[in-house]
Image (spheres, rainbow, N blue to C red):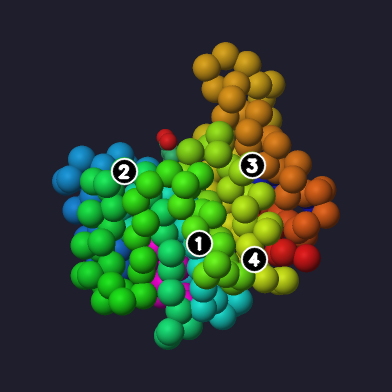
Amino acid sequence: MNKQFGNDDPALSAYVARVYAPEDEVLREIRERSTRAGLPDIQLAALDARHLEILARACRARRAVEIGTLGGYSGVAILRGMEPDGVLDTVEIEPKHAEIARESFRKSGFTARARVHVGSAQKILPRLTRRGPFDLCFIDADKEGYPAYLDWAAGNLRPAGLVVLDNAFLFGRLAKKPKGKAAGEIAAMQKTHDMLARDGRFRATVFPTGEGLAVGVKL
Ligand code: DHB
Ligand code: MG
């Protein structure tokens, strides 16, 4: 039987959170310090952070790129899943967010393996190409940029490398007709899914987490 996405019984997510404990002290400290510093409370859900760690671990990632560092919450999750010598290049447009993230990488012992690049992805990504091909690319930045970021990932992942995208449900707006204030974001996210699903460069799916976590394997 094909059930709907999600499940509205909060006991299930509470159970999984209790048993798998996806947010440990280190991640909790990052989230709380980010909030105190005035960062928007939009970091990855704790269980999606665990998903990210598991995906990095499963593909034995040694080189990874993250687009949208924020306070470093997801970056720490990626680095935890990476091989011991793995390096994460993470791109952040806001200098203040990047400073918080650097502190997060320092506190979690990842300073030597996290390179924080401050600037627009449009400017930084072409410079990262020479460090590739990459094992994993995580996209969690401005939603209108997703098609371009996915295109970059398609060109810079190794065969069987993973692209992972947060907010694949676009806060519940994904299936709506692109109009009004959110038209640009809706059109961009729909284009992203079209690319992932059928432009021939990936075999992909959407894991129905709270925000929707899209995952594609590079062909
Ligand atoms: C927003 C962005 C995100 O990446 C997210 O996970 C949640 C919210 C936002 O821009 O509002
Ligand atoms: Mg996000």
Give me the disc on residue 147.
3
Mark 3 and mark 2: span between their CA atoms?
21 Å
Q: Earlier in the sequence, mark 1 or mark 4?
A: 1
Callout 1, which amino acid? Leu
Mark 3: few/some/many CA within 10 Å (<14, 14-19, 20+): many
For the residues labelled 1 and 3, say whether their Cβ atoms are less than 8 Å apart: no
Q: Quadrant of the C terminus?
A: bottom right
Vertical position of residue 205 compared to residue 195: above or below = below
Residue at 46% across, 52% down: 124
Mark 1 and mark 3: span between their CA atoms?
18 Å
Q: Earlier in the sequence, mark 1 or mark 2?
A: 2
Give me the disc on residue 94.
2
Q: Earlier in the sequence, mark 4 or mark 3?
A: 3
Residue at disc 1, CB closer than 8 Å to ligand 2 = no
Residue at 63% across, 16% down: 179
Residue 209 horizontal/vertical position (percent): 56, 51
Out of 147 and 1, give the one closest to the viewer: 147
In the image, is 163 to the left or to the right of 78? right
Residue 34 horizontal/vertical position (percent): 23, 50
Give me the disc on residue 128.
1
